[in-house]
Image (cartoon, rainbow, N blue to C red):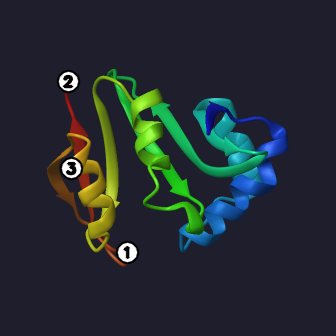
Amino acid sequence: MIYRNFCLRDLNQVEGISRESFPFPLSKLAILLLSVVCRIYVAVEEGNVLGYLVLGEKRAGGLFIFHIAVKSGCRKCGVASGFMGHFVDGVCSVRTHVSNAAAQRFYKKHGFKVLKRLRYSGDEDEYLMRREL
């Protein structure tokens, strides 16, 4: 498996992974716009994108994980952990839905701690998680 920067030939596969992973997936346009202001990485094996990571930089310093997703047949195979090892270093933050226990376990395994609960009206609350090294 190779981890590398996103390129245009990955667009359809990244959109497909987003569609199967999230209730409100990223559109092709959103992915292209994010590629301008964020760093997008993909995990590729034999020409197939297995997962993607969207990282943003915070003005105050550190990184923010905007999206991380893995193709359904490749989950729990180390793809997401590989992204964490290759690209996520130093101080980093992420938000996860309160009901997403699997994501919370994943981030805790990688040194993240819940900082606070973010309350939303009409949408599900989220936890703000942060890792400091």
User: Which labelled disc corresponds to residue 133?
Assistant: 2
Residue type indicated by callout 3 = Lys
Q: Is residue 68 left or right of residue 49?
A: left
Task: State the count of labels.
Answer: 3
Marks 2,3: beta carbons within 8 A? no
Q: Residue at x 78, y 49 (%)?
A: 11
Q: Nearer the viewer, residue 81 or 28?
A: 81
Q: Position of residue 24 (x, y in %)?
A: 57, 70
Q: Is residue 107 left or right of residue 85?
A: left
Residue designated by label 1: 123
Q: Please identify, in this view, whether the residue under mark 3 or under mark 1 is nearer the observer.
A: 3
- Distance from disc 2 to disc 3, alpha carbons, whole Å, reads 14 Å
Element type at mark 1: loop
Q: Please identify, in this view, whether the residue under mark 1 or under mark 2 is nearer the observer.
A: 2
User: Which mark is first along the chain, 2 or 1?
Assistant: 1
Residue type indicated by callout 1 = Asp
Q: Position of residue 129 (x, y in %)?
A: 23, 47
Q: Position of residue 53 (x, y in %)?
A: 54, 43
Element type at mark 3: helix
Q: Position of residue 48 (x, y in %)?
A: 74, 51
* Mark 1, other Cα within 10 Å: few <14 / some 14–19 / many ≥20: few
Question: From what the image shows, is residue 62 above or below residue 99?
Answer: above
Q: Is residue 95 left or right of residue 68?
A: left
- Distance from disc 1 to disc 2, alpha carbons, whole Å, reads 32 Å
Element type at mark 2: loop
| Outermost residue, bottom side | 122
Q: Nearer the viewer, residue 125 or 103?
A: 103
- Distance from disc 3 to disc 1, alpha carbons, whole Å, reads 24 Å
Residue type indicated by callout 2 = Leu
Q: Residue at x 19, y 29 (%)?
A: 132
Residue designated by label 3: 108
